Amino acid sequence: MKITVTNWTPYFTGDKVISFGRDAINHTQTGYTGVTQTWQYIDSETKKDVNVDGSYMKFVDMDGKQFITFDKETTNKIDKIYVSDDSWLDATQNPDGSLKVADIGDVGSVDTDPFAQFTTLFTGGKMTFTWGKDYEAAGYNKNQSAAKGLAGNEYFAYSDQKPVRTETLKPTKLVNDKDEKDKTENTLDAVQEAYNYTISHTVPNESEDFYYKSYVYEDTLVAPLELTSIKVTNELGKDVTSFFKNETEGNKVKLSATEEALSSADFYGHNYFYSMNVKVKDGANLDDFKDDNGTIHF
């Protein structure tokens, strides 16, 4: 992301400061009624501007008469705004089409206070807004200076936590054998040929409020097949089979995530790969799975 400060409105008559964090998306200021800036998504490799559909931004720790005013262009791209039921923030549509979200209580908060947060869902690659503080309404004297050598007192922070749980994503199932890779259907050259099903599923990163109550992988193998082994790995190739309780019975495959796994942040934000090795049962009737040439398809 590229952040460009394009304008600023002084309030203090003395020294003022604008600073940005190194390890997170945040910045501070002291002495300015408003700091106007544009946030633009860029490709990390090409450094060119990119558009993003369905993006979200969560702004936190809005207190002490702080406000964010989105310009008209950005406001028109905001699809929804989420706040908590006990939010102390006020939203006002201005005559010029801009949207102002502000703390009007002049009290303090911390990053994790939901009542001092709001999340915007928007479409597009950039947003332009003014981040500021109503110093006059908060009773500040103009004739003062920011402390030298220090970051600003007014803290602006962004969080990547979502306001609601992510929609459950669909899994993908592929089959592999000695001469076929990542197919949706398998053709056997010989009855004795063993092969593998790999089912991939993404579990999005979630905040603790949206941890799953249950997470179950279920599948049913066709009658002629026998499950010989099953293993679960993540996108790093790490064996995470221990995250699951194997409740498979016969050809009905069932893996249930343990309570310990579901309550741990380590479970979320990963791709899981369920690898099932199978073979044809001895003496199995395969008539229903043969084509006119006698080739076996599963």
Image (cartoon, rainbow, N blue to C red):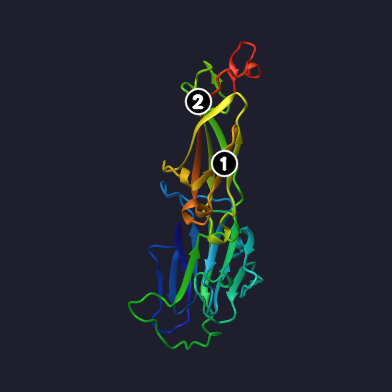
Q: Determine whether 222 is above or below 23 in the image.
A: above
**Of all residues shown, which one is farthest toward the top?**
293
Could you tell me which residue is drawn at 57 percent across and 41 percent down?
247
Quadrant assignment for the C terminus:
top right
The location of residue 60, given as percent across then percent down, is: 52, 69
Q: Nearer the viewer, mark 1 or mark 2?
A: 1
Q: Which amino acid does label 1 sit on?
A: Glu
Q: Is mark 2 on a helix, strand or loop?
A: strand
The location of residue 57, given as percent across then percent down, is: 54, 61
Q: Give the mark nearer the N terminus: 1 vs 2.
A: 2
Could you tell me which residue is drawn at 50 percent across and 69 percent down?
36
Q: Quote the CA–CA distance across marks 1 and 2.
A: 22 Å
**Mark 1 highlights which residue?**
247
For mark 1, does the 10 Å Cα neighbourhood hold few (<14), some (14 to 19), or many (20 or more) residues?
few
Quarter where residue 15 is shown: bottom left
Q: Determine whether 115 is above or below 147 in the image.
A: above
Q: Residue 195 carries which label?
A: 2
Could you tell me which residue is drawn at 61 percent across and 48 percent down?
168
